[in-house]
Image: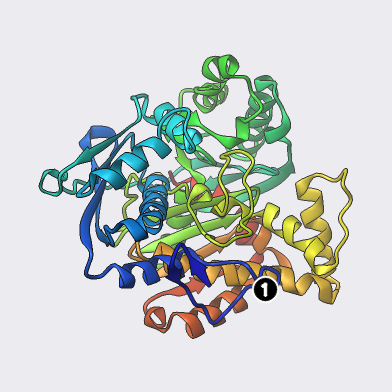
Amino acid sequence: MNVKGIEVAIKNQPVLDPKFIPMYAFSTAFEQSAANGQPVILALERENGQITRLETKIHGTPEMRDADILYIERTVKMMLWAAGGYKIYVCGNDDIGNAVKEIYRLGGERDFDADFMESVYEKPFEVVVLPLEEAPQEKQSPKQIGGNNTGCRIGFDAGGSDRKVSAVIDGEPVFSEEVVWHPKVTADPEYHYNEIVTAFKTAASKMPRVDAIGISSAGVYVDNRAMVASLFIKVPKDQFDAKVKNIYINAAKEIGDVPVNVVNDGDVTALAGAITLGDNNVLGIAMGTSEAVGYVNKDGNITGWLNELAFAPVDIGDDKAWDEWSGDKGVGCKYFSQDAVNRLAPLSGIELPEDATPAEKLKIVQGLMNDGDARAVPVYETIGCYLAHAIAYYSKFYDIRHILLLGRVMSGKGGDVLLATATRVLEEEYPQLTGKLEINLPDEKFRRLGQSVVAASL
């Protein structure tokens, strides 16, 4: 396979996606090809002057310019959605830097990314082109959260298809409930608010008092405020600012004057992994309505990174899946979610009703899988193959010892097939990772309700 003059080869191709080209394979082949090329430093700045930095090389020749731009742009995209930031520094090559500036300008090809980061950090988004010697230095400030188990606590997990709540006393769940809801297709913020308050009050009724509330929710949260969240995608901007940004803070007040902490659901997944495994360097991946990712570093801390790998690149092939929200192709949310299952099912001969919701379609495929229908197996084998290749790429940016998989897609027999395929492909394709990291799959109850229980400790 050839990508902009870079020859790419893999041993394991997803059975239902013959044109898939993993980012790891492309980036590794590019880096080998450019090993004697021109040094470039990429750096991203986020809140409090924190800097994430990466040193690499490009060819720096006219004939390889397209490959250089593609590699740098996709690497910037990965760094942006992993670490986050409102300012991108491209240092060492003005031509490539200006190309990235054009791509990531407001109104440009990556307008969604620029606008998203402006909303998160409430600062203008920009790309700065500098000489190599003026590249910013690395600066990180990890945070410690979780581990608070004493007293009577509510843990709430806001998923895109269902909401889960747990009542936890001294670290032991005494009640857990999962309720279907439809936040991503509802424009009225009162619907969201009432559903959240109902869950809180239900859990509160199972305990003598409430000492704290911990919330796991998709999106980006700063000081418990929702800055950007796909759960509320249909809520108009003025209503979002007025009623959604403080939705969890206000809902908690309905229970009383108790401490509340809202954390991205991916980080809660990673925290769950660190707690259950008794180890750190955990990358948590929750495959449900979208792909939610979080990370706990070697010290057991949350890094403060965005970890929104739903929008990070996975596939650089010719037939990349399109994400209607971000406007990009080949990004994680279309490969590690119910959308991935529903996209692949027809390719395996499974007809899904057009009028069914994405969650209902997933249940149909899961039902076929659990009933032994052979058509469902390639769907999960394909996602497992995707996952192995993506884990290898993620390992270029994260120091990983454990992968913890959660979410609706991992439920039932399909999750077992997905895990077995991912493990096999990792061993065959990436022997350098064998023994360095392992994939962990919690039991069925924890896959579905674990995040709400862990959220109680936030």
The answer to whether residue 410 shows anywhere in this view is yes
Q: Quadrant of the C terminus?
A: top left
- Can you give x and y, in whole percent of width and height, for residue 435 in the image? 39, 82
Residue ranking furthest to the left: 133
Name the element at disc 1.
helix
| Above or below: residue 46 compared with residue 35 | above
From the viewer's side, name the closer residue of 52 and 319: 319
From the viewer's side, name the closer residue of 170 and 2: 2
Q: Residue at x 62, y 45 (%)?
A: 323
**Other residues around mark 1 within 10 Å, as few (<14) / some (14–19) / many (≥20):** many
- Can you give x and y, in whole percent of width and height, for residue 12 in the image? 57, 79
- Can you give x and y, in whole percent of width and height, for residue 423 in the image? 54, 78
Q: Is residue 415 left or right of residue 253?
A: right
Q: Residue at x 60, y 76 (%)?
A: 13
Q: In which quarter of the view is residue 422 placed?
A: bottom right
Q: Is residue 78 left or right of residue 179?
A: left
By what rule are the colours in the image chosen? rainbow
Q: Residue at x 54, y 34 (%)?
A: 229
Task: Count all numbered tags in the image, as a single digit.
Answer: 1
Q: Residue under label 1, please give it.
A: 381
Q: Is residue 159 left or right of residue 153?
A: right
Residue ranking furthest to the front: 63
From the viewer's side, name the closer residue of 426 and 439: 426
Q: Residue at x 65, y 21 (%)?
A: 189
- Can you give x and y, in whole percent of width and height, for residue 428 in the image? 50, 85
The answer to whether residue 170 shows anywhere in this view is no
Q: In the rendered structure, which amino acid carries the disc numbered 1?
A: Glu
